[in-house]
Image (cartoon, rainbow, N blue to C red):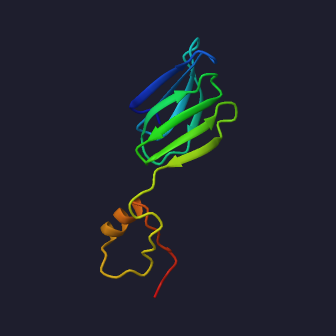
């Protein structure tokens, strides 16, 4: 699915463009042909910023999912995921009572964890 692109960056090293956008993916494009030659998946929200390192070997992407990912441009595999600590990081809300599903979803987005298989 092609969508709205939020960021685009040119690599002098590989003569490629990369784009990131609403569809949560990163696309690599050949400048000469204008064709997409690779699609990288791994974010869970839109990709708002992307860049290559100086030698074009690493692609860096930042997403609204709160992560920054480093990718190997030869294999398109993730090298590292960076995430700042969230306010409720690793707070276990398994079995918590008095929380609505919306509240649980919000807490999990802020780092809380819940054992989905737990049934009292």
In which quadrant of the rendered view does residue 77 lie? Answer: top right
Q: Is residue 52 above or below residue 45?
A: above
Between 27 and 65, the residue placed more toward the observer is 65
Residue with the most extreme top position: 32
Residue pictured at 60% horizontal, 22% vertical: 54
Residue situated furthest right in the rendering = 75
In the rendered image, residue 31, in percent from the top left (x then y), is placed at 56, 14
- Judge left or right: residue 101 versus residue 12: left
Q: Name the residue furthest bottom.
A: 120
Q: Position of residue 53 (x, y in %)?
A: 58, 26
Q: Position of residue 67 (x, y in %)?
A: 48, 46
Task: Identify which residue is drawn at 45% across, 55% down.
Answer: 85
- Total number of numbered discs in the rendering: 0
Q: Residue at x 52, y 77 (%)?
A: 117
Residue 48 in the image: state x and y as whole percent. Answer: 41, 35
Q: Is residue 89 above or below residue 43?
A: below
In the foreground, 27 or 111: 111
Q: Residue at x 43, y 48 (%)?
A: 65
């Amino acid at each position: 699915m092609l969508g709205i692109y939020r960021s685009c960056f040119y690599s002098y090293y590989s003569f490629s463009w990369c784009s990131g956008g609403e569809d949560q993916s990163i696309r690599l494009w050949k400048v000469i042909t204008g064709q997409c030659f690779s699609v990288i998946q791994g974010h869970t929200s839109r990709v708002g910023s992307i860049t290559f390192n100086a030698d074009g070997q690493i692609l860096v992407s930042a997403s609204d999912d709160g992560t920054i990912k480093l990718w190997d441009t030869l294999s398109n595999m993730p090298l590292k995921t960076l995430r700042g600590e969230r306010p409720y990081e690793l707070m276990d809300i398994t079995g918590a009572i008095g929380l609505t599903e919306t509240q649980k979803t919000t807490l999990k987005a802020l780092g809380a964890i819940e054992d989905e298989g737990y049934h009292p």
